[in-house]
Image: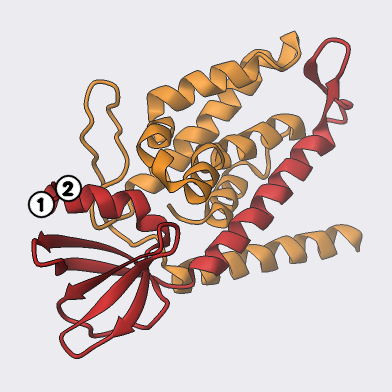
Chain colours: A orange, B red
Amino acid sequence: MPDLLTHFSVAYLLRRNAKAPHLRATFYLGAILPDIVTRPVYILYPKAFWAITVLHTPVALTLLCLLISYIFYNSVREMVFANNTLGVYLHLFLDLFQKHITPEYMWLFPLSWKAYEIGLFWPEMHELTSCYHLILLSRYVCRKVGERR
Amino acid sequence: MFGGTRKVRWYIACYQKETKIGNIYGDGFEIVQPYDDVTIFVSGDTTGLIKNAYVTLMAKFHKEGYLELQSIHVHKHRRVKFIASIVTAIIVFANFIRWFKFDVHRKWFVERCQTY
C-alpha cells in the first residue's frame, strides 16, 4: 500500500473544493478505509492475514460502505454511501499501480482468488511521495496565509 | 511436512509484515520472525541488505533446514510509514468528528451543522 498519508493527500487534492464539507469528510474516510479495516488486524495478529485480506477487495469494501452508511441519518445516507465508496475506489485504484514480490490484492474476489497488480512502483517510494506531500503542504499553507490576509 | 516453494511462499506471506534480517554472512543471511521467535538461514545474494531491515522474500525450502533466496524486497523506513499512517488516520477521524456527531438516542451519526 502507499501509506495513508499518500492516500489521504490524493483524496484531498481531488475533493478539496467540494462544497459540502461533511461529505468531503466521508470521502476522506473512504480513502483510508481499506487499510484501516485490514492492516492493524494482521500487523498485530499476523496469522489473520488470509482471513482479513479479503476485506481489501472491491466487493467486501462496497458491502462495508453500505453497512457504514446505515449508521448515518436518513437524509445523508445515500450521499455518505456514494462518497465513502468513491473514496474506497480511489484507494483501490492507487493500490493497483504498486508492486509486491507476490501480488496481494484479489480484485475479483469472490469470483477468483487470483491477485493482480500493474506494478509500477514499490510501496516505499518515499522520495517521490515526500516531494509530493511537501508541494501539497506548501500550497495548503500558502492558501491559508492568503485567506488570513 | 513442509516442502516446496508454494508452502514457503505462504509461510513467508503470513509473516511478511514483520520479517527482519538477522546476521549477514558471506553466502547468505538469517531472517528473524519476531512473533514466533523463528530464525532461518537464507542462502543467496546479500548485496544491499542491512541488519534489522524489514523484508519480504520468496525462497525455496531445502530439507536440510535452510532457504534458497529467489527474490527479496527491503521495506525502507517501515516504521516512518507506520507513524505517518497513524497520524493521517487521526487527522481524518478528527475531520470526520468535526462535521458529524453521534446521536446516542437514535444511534446514528448526524451532521453537526450545515454551514455550506
Secondary element at image label 2: helix
**Residue type highlighted by circle 1:** Gly
How far from the left and from the top, in percent, is residue B55?
34, 67
Residue at image point 24% right, 39% down: A115
> Is residue A102 in sight in this rendering?
yes
What crowding class fits label 1: few (fewer than 14 Cα within 10 Å), some (14-19), or many (20 or more)?
A: few
Chain letter of the residue beneath label 2 in the structure image? B
What crowding class fits label 2: few (fewer than 14 Cα within 10 Å), some (14-19), or many (20 or more)?
A: some
Secondary element at image label 1: loop
Relative to B80, B75 lies left or right: left
The quarter of the rendered structure image containing the C terminus of chain A is bottom right
Asked whether B100 or A38 is in front, the reply is A38
How far from the left and from the top, in percent, is residue B105?
88, 11
Q: Which mark is residue B3?
A: 1
Asked whether B6 or B72 is in front, the reply is B6
Q: Which mark is residue B7?
A: 2
**Residue type highlighted by circle 2:** Lys
